[in-house]
Image (cartoon, helix red, strand yellow):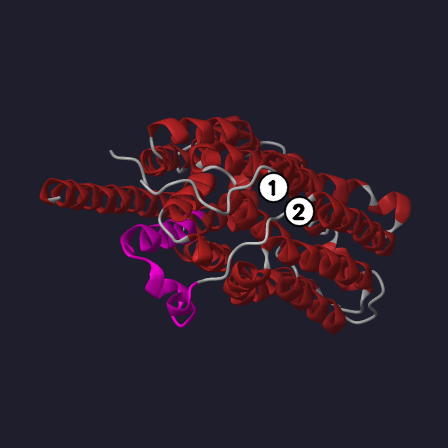
Amino acid sequence: MPAESTTPTSATETAYWRRNLFVCFAGSFINIVAMTLLLPFLPLYVEQLGVEGHAAIVQWSGIAYGATFFAAALVAPLWGRLGDRYGRKLMLVRASFGMAVTMSLMGMVHDVWQLVALRLLIGFAGGYTSGSTILVAMQTPKDRSGWALGLLSSGIMAGNLVGPLVGGALPPFIGIRTIFLLSGGVIFIAFLATTFLIREDVRPALAKGEKRKGGWALIADKRPIVAMLATGLLLMFANMSIEPIITVYVAQLANDQSQVTLISGVVMSAAALGSILSATRLGKFADRVGHWNVIVGALAISALLLIPQAFVTESWQLIGLRFLMGLALGGLLPCITSVIRHNVPDGVGGNVLGLSISAQYVGQVAGPLLGGYVGGHFGMRAVFLGTSVLMAGGAAYNWLVQSRRARDMLIEARKS
């Protein structure tokens, strides 16, 4: 298939892209660790805030955790558009400072409503990792974008892996409230690094005609963008649809019920570990063979790997298959971002990438809801098999869109 773009080197690509990449890598890792370390003790903290009864604790924990993704999905396009207009570094500075303050305040709340409000606020004010993705995507040379975004994705996924481990280990030693204050302090360090180390050239303003148009109107061929928005939503939906049922599924497989939570944690970590190991390599590979080819292949392979997951008889089989699935999907998000980067004008890149991030957040919210419903009403196997069908459909859809686009480009080339 042809390369995703034939446009010349972008004015937004800078000589500082490598340094900015590594600052964003470290900052994203720190922010994700701080955001995910509360997962092991969130129900305990909700109980400390006066919520009584198992059902109420679980419900409020879910509300508090999901509030951040809900808020982030609403404002991601806004921050992307403001980044296009006022600078993407400014968005990272705003996000890291807002998250440092909000995370610290979480350690001082005295009511569960205050906790939920702050979780909403951190979703509205945050977005460091999404901002990093936009800055790296727009500054990196297009022929290195897959590798750079793969490296950044590895840092994000490593944070998702390390955060819950740290959050599970620290409470007995320093207490839950102190953890929030410590997290705020660490994020403040990321704020300082972002402020003083990241460099961004002043970009020329959009032409008058472009200022009057919305970002969507400036995209000549919208098919790649629509496909990537749908694929990002599908990826997160597929990943998160499995999460609510893993512990219950492992309980059916494990001989020793006292080990269920441990094995479940290993199962969840296996996919993340696989993605960490493969993201940079798949991104670099995609720079050579085409990002869209890797997207189609990753979706197809994951669809095949989901089928045996529905029929495993031992926990180790599930762990191995989840690891392989993580390897397959590791380069997917970097490739989705790269395809968008190659097919939008520089002046609206942040706006469109913000829409992509919103679509992914929607998948993160909808996936657990539907996965839990299907698992509860139709059984665990139905979740894996249904998700497999969705991933296969996503692979077919992307292949069809790219094939038609390649055909149209060939026809246009012959006419000229």
Which residue matches tag 1?
156
> In which image quadrant can residue 166 be found?
top right
The amino acid type found where label 1 is placed reads: Ile
User: Magenta residues?
Assistant: 207-235
Label 1 residue SS: helix
Query: Residue at 33% of width from left, 55% of height from top?
Result: 226
Q: Would residue 274 be seen by someone viewing this image from the given angle? A: yes
Q: Residue furthest right?
A: 174
The secondary structure that most of the magenta stretch takes on is helix
* Quadrant in the picture for the C terminus: top left
Which residue matches tag 2?
32
Give neighbour class at mark 1: few <14, some 14-19, many 20+ (Cα, 10 Å): many
Q: Nearer the viewer, residue 312 or 201?
A: 201
Q: Nearer the viewer, residue 67 or 334?
A: 334
The amino acid type found where label 2 is placed reads: Ile
Q: Position of residue 380 (x, y in %)?
A: 43, 46
Left or right position of 95 against 3 = right
Q: Position of residue 110 (x, y in %)?
A: 83, 70
Tell whether label 2 touches label 1 (CB within 8 Å).
yes
